Amino acid sequence: MGLDPGEKRIGVAVSDVGRLIASSLETISRKNFAIDAEAILKLYDARRCAGFVVGLPLNMDGSAGPSAQAARAFARNVLNVRDAPLLLWDERLSTAAVTRTLIEGDTSRRRRGEVVDKMAAAYMLQGALDAMQELKHA
């Protein structure tokens, strides 16, 4: 399960059983961590997920700013409620890439706001899945 935690929303994506294709699933509006975690784990369990990939928004120079620190704290909190494999994945530019694609597809501003977080989670998860496939075949 791919999670892209933002200040207001958490984008959620999942992969197929073979861990080849990521698909956007849902956007969770953040309330407090207990409520957010309950929503995440309900999706996780229903899909029988095997682990988490959490987006790590590093700065362009690779350094970690406040957003990356918040993502790390979010990941620690997830591990406190579910003992499962968790990978932090560099998600620089994922939201920008998805937004650009949506704009090029002439998606309205309102619709972009509704889907950008879950699509960014899928974009980030796909990058992690692709890297895992490369390692598997190296």
Image (cartoon, rainbow, N blue to C red):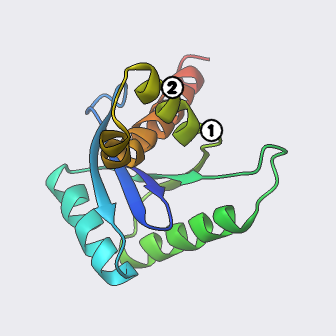
Task: Identify residue for label 1.
Answer: 93
The label shown at residue 52 is none
Relative vertical location of residue 65 with respect to residue 33 in this rendering, above or below = above
Task: Identify residue for label 2.
Answer: 130
Q: Viewer-proximal residue, 73 or 101?
A: 101
Relative vertical location of residue 122 with respect to residue 7 in this rendering, above or below = above
For label 2, the SS is helix
Residue lying at 62% horizontally and 38% vertically, measured from the top left:
93
For label 1, the SS is loop
Horizontal and vertical percent for residue 82?
Answer: 36, 71
Residue farthest left in this picture: 46
Q: Earlier in the sequence, mark 1 or mark 2?
A: 1
The amino acid sitting under disc 2 is: Asp
Relative vertical location of residue 59 with respect to residue 83 in this rendering, above or below = above
- Relative placement, left or right, of 42 versus 36 is left
The amino acid sitting under disc 1 is: Leu
Q: Quadrant of residue 33?
A: bottom left
Residue lying at 45% horizontally and 41% vertically, measured from the top left:
120
The local crowd at label 1, few if under 14, some if 14 to 19, many if 20 or more residues have their Cα within 10 Å, is some
Q: Quadrant of residue 44?
A: bottom left
- Relative placement, left or right, of 14 versus 53 is left
Residue lying at 30% horizontally and 28% vertically, measured from the top left:
18
